[in-house]
Amino acid sequence: MIRSSALKKEKQLRLARNTSKSRKIINIARKNTRELQNYFISNKSQSTSNEKFTYKTRTFTDPSCQKLTDFLKQKGTDYNNNTQDYYQIIHNSFLLQLMKQKVCASCKLIWNGDMSVAKREGLYCSLVFTCCCSHEIKINISKQCLNTSKRDINVRSVIGANFAGISHQGLVKLCAILNVPLPIDEDHFSDTLDYLLPTFESYKLRSMKNAVEEACKKSNGRKITVSGDGTWQKRGFSILHGVLEVLSNGPTAKVHI
């Protein structure tokens, strides 16, 4: 009995310690969440419902953004510095809630109807809102790249999958986890990559050339010492990513990839 009672007390103490540890982890997670919320959301004093989030202005200046910007400019896409020019992921139910707060342009009553998908191409789709009076409102969720039949959101998804090194299979898994439509099929994915390749190559060569010229200028000559390294990644049997890094040995080292 004494041994049984001691074991019981030991289990209770272990449970209490685990509970205390779990609470500390939860509190840290909550603190980090609040810090992230403070960074991304400017109006903390307002309600935190999905309809009242107001995002701070963000400047997208990373290398991937620069490559995509160059691509869009070369292809004649209407590119500007509008801070609202980005995508939001929104649940369908919130779209219906929004529509039900509007007045139908046809019957002049509060809109009451349903939403359907008229056309889908990967992550792109054309939505149709049909009122009970049969009046329809159509909206596309992504613009079309000029001089092509490709949709902006699908092109961006291919670029993102390529930069992240997950290819089509990884993109399919990501979309499934996010509960969004599946991306374009593998054939169209490969076709889009072939379409983007000339732009990627052009940017890569220009970037490496600029890095070489800057390194030579800093070193006051073209005979400079460099060191290199490389690696590769293979996923399954359908993707092979490799990278080679060459680092110049100068006052301000430059990496050539």
Image (cartoon, grey):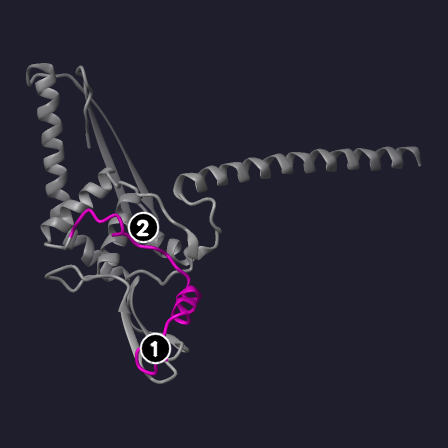
Q: Nearer the viewer, residue 154 or 35?
A: 35
Question: Of tags 1 and 2, which is closer to the observer?
Answer: 1
- 15 relative to 87, above or below: above
Residue 212 x %, y %: 11, 26
Magenta span: 79-108
Q: Which residue is mark 2?
A: 237
- Identify the residue under disc 1: 104
Between 97 and 60, the residue placed more toward the observer is 97
**Amino acid at pointer 2:** Phe
Q: Residue at x 31, y 82 (%)?
A: 106
**Left or right: residue 51 compared with residue 122:** right
Q: Are marks 1 and 2 in contact (CB under 8 Å)?
A: no
Earlier residue among tags 1 and 2: 1
Q: Is residue 117 magenta?
A: no
Query: Residue sitting at 19 percent across and 53 percent down?
Result: 193
Residue at image location 17% in from the left, 49% down from the top: 80
Residue at the location (13% across, 32% down)? Answer: 208
Q: Which quadrant holds the N terminus? A: top right
Element type where label 1 sits in the image: loop
Magenta: main secondary structure: loop
